[in-house]
Image (cartoon, rainbow, N blue to C red):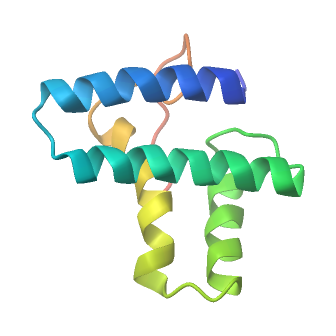
Amino acid sequence: MTTTPASLAELLLSWQVALNAENKSPNTIAQYRDGVHAFLRWCEQTDTAPELSKPAVQGFLASLLNGGAQPATARAPATSLCAPSRRGWPLRAKSAPMRCWA
């Protein structure tokens, strides 16, 4: 199943609630939220399917690096896309968790 921007946005809301419940810092929650939003913007700008797949996330990361971002700076948004799977949250609505690509 491919994840659509609407379902990613819905999942993002649930991730934020879970992070709040885990007492994560507001900065951590903002970093994860901003990373997902940046990915969705990139998908829209590049006409890339907004799915959390290895090719899509690698393309997003490459775009950040090609745009002049330092490796650690570019990796932060991509890492935020992977963070939910490390906590066992599904990366796709109504499906089993996807393995992280990193």
Q: Position of residue 87 (x, y in %)?
A: 26, 35
Q: Is 57 placed above or below 2 here?
A: below
Q: Tell me where residue 64 sits by quadrant.
A: bottom right
Q: Is residue 62 left or right of residue 24?
A: right
Q: Is residue 20 left or right of residue 64?
A: left
Question: In the image as oriented, which residue stretches furthest toward the left?
Answer: 23
Q: Is residue 86 in sight in this rendering?
A: yes
Which part of the image, by quadrant, shows the N terminus? top right
Q: Nearer the viewer, residue 44 or 90?
A: 44
- Number of disc labels: 0
Q: Tell me where residue 40 sits by quadrant.
A: top right
Q: Is 24 placed above or below 95 here?
A: below
Q: Nearer the viewer, residue 97 or 24?
A: 24
Question: In the image as oriented, which residue stretches furthest toward the top?
Answer: 94
Q: Position of residue 55 (x, y in %)?
A: 70, 56
Which residue is drawn at the image coordinates 72% and 26% (left, top)?
Answer: 4
Which residue is drawn at the image coordinates 46% and 40% (left, top)?
Answer: 99
Q: Position of residue 102 (x, y in %)?
A: 45, 60
Q: Is 69 placed above or below 19 here?
A: below
Q: Is residue 3 in sight in this rendering?
A: no
Which residue is drawn at the image coordinates 61% and 41% (left, top)?
Answer: 52
Q: Is 1 placed above or below 62 here?
A: above
Which residue is drawn at the image coordinates 71% and 73% (left, top)?
Answer: 63
